[in-house]
Image (tube, helix red, strand yellow):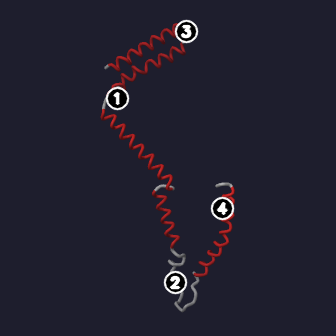
Amino acid sequence: MIAETVCSAVSAAGLGIAAVTAYRRRFLTAARVAAYSLVPIGLVMTGVVEWLADTAFSPVAWAGFGVLGVAWVLFMTTRAVERRRGGTRKQRKEARAAAQRDAVAPGASAPSLGSGSGSPRPAAQPASRPAKASLGGDDDFSDIEAILKKHGI
């Protein structure tokens, strides 16, 4: 009740100032003052002021704001921890799955196509070729690594 009376008085005073400003032929400023002075009475008419007054004096509402604050702190903490660990749960799960796939020998899951007479399998020869290529590729990566270390990256 008091808040509505104060808002109405502020609006009336603002409209009075706008009328005086318009009398001095400063119409643009008068229109702006009138617009600002109509905001409090508009808030009273829509019920926003009553809602704010009820919220400001309600212990349950303040407890709700406290709960929202705790939730926000928890969200921010989990995000910070997630950034330090290096990604989301899904990304860590994919990294573990990739590590498990790399742990298995390349030819272990290939079916044996040989006749069992002790002759070498055709699949064994291609498996040795990538190993030789990776040995030559390590030099490239070491060069790149040296360049990055040189630049402090």
Q: Counting other residues with Cα less than 10 Å from the Cα at mark 3, is it few (<14), some (14-19), or many (20 or more)?
A: few
Element under disc 1: helix
Disc nearest the viewer among 4 and 3: 4
Q: Mark 2 points at which residue?
A: 112
Tell me if residue 113 comes above or below residue 4 in the rendering: below
The numbered mark at residue 25 is 3
Q: Name the residue under label 1.
A: 56
Residue 99 in percent (x, y) is at 51, 67
Residue 146 in percent (x, y) is at 68, 61
Q: Distance between the residues labelled 2 and 1?
A: 77 Å
Amino acid carrying label 4: it is: Glu
Amino acid carrying label 1: it is: Ala
Q: Name the residue under label 4.
A: 145
Disc nearest the viewer among 4 and 2: 4
- Closer to the chain start, of discs 2 and 3, is 3
Rendered residue at 51%/7% (across/down): 23
Amino acid carrying label 2: it is: Ser
- Closer to the chain start, of discs 4 and 2, is 2
Element under disc 2: loop
Q: Distance between the residues labelled 4 and 2?
A: 40 Å
